[in-house]
Image (cartoon, rainbow, N blue to C red):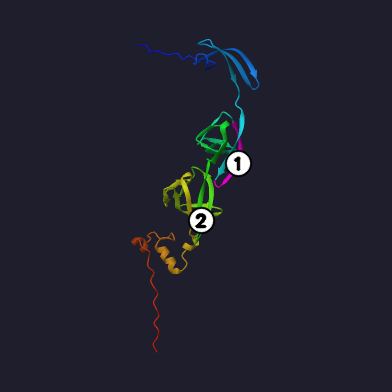
Amino acid sequence: MDDEYVEEEFVENVTDCPGCGEFCGQDILKEKKAGEGTDYLLKCQECGHVHTLQIRPPRSIVIPFILSEGAHSRVAEIEIDDDEELHIGDIFEHEDASWEINRVETKTGNSRRKLVASKIGRANAVRSDVVMVRLTLTRGEFSDSDSIFVEREKMFKAGSIMEHDGSKWKIRAIHTGSGRTMTGRVSAHDIKRIYLHEPPRVEENIPQTPRERRQAWKEGRLGNNPNPEVPDAEKSGKPKQQRQGRRQKKKRN
């Protein structure tokens, strides 16, 4: 059995016919320029109805947008076509940045999920290509708050060292929407806050006294002991108890 092929028919100048109500081909009888648009006199190929079709380019209008980037917001007047429909979640480019629409209002201030531009009174959008990550920086007993802007997909690893404002900090914990984590990696757009602690100074770990240096050599911390000993605290999992010094007895008279 031979395969049957259905040849597709391409019809030019297709539009709705007001005579028969069908979306079908039209013959152009007359064409006339009208400003920036064109008027066409058409004849329906199905029913023969003659009618006029006016084609006009969309009119540009200016809509005030509240653009939010972290804690900072500003108003920008953006020009778009009056017949364009805006939806919450739409992403657009403006001033070399990406923005996501999160609110659309009518001219009376009512919020809508979508709206034709000619009926929009105001729209809100947030920066979508970067996100703000809040920081808590702890040095000793004092803590400060700060924030940084990073790409949405940037990864942060708990326990790693990061630089901020010219200093190095250790990521102690990362707070997501479901709680804190002290292990693993988290992308920036899932982070609520990063907790940073000042990392221990190198000089604090250097053995100072001869006794400390001998103990460091035994444990392999000086790098020249082929068979280092495991500290007692690591064997038992408990911190090593410090021996108290002997009290000097007073001499009796």
SS for dot 1: strand
Instruction: Say which amino acid is labelled 2.
Output: Leu
* Residue 4 to residue 109: above or below: above
Q: Residue type at mark 1? A: Val
Disc 2 crowd rating (10 Å Cα; few below 14, some 14-19, many 20+) is many
The residue wearing badge 2 is: 137
Q: Secondary structure at mark 2?
A: strand
Work out which residue is located at the far top of the displayed protein and give it. 48
- State the extent of the magenta-drawn residues as a range: 70-80
- Where is residue 188 drawn, in percent x and y? 48, 45
Q: Residue at x 56, y 34 (%)?
A: 120
Q: Quadrant of the C terminus?
A: bottom left
Q: Position of residue 44 (x, y in %)?
A: 53, 12
Q: Is residue 71 magenta?
A: yes
Q: Quadrant of the N terminus?
A: top left
Q: Which residue is mark 1?
A: 75
Question: How much space separates mark 2 and mark 1, taking CA atoms?
Answer: 32 Å
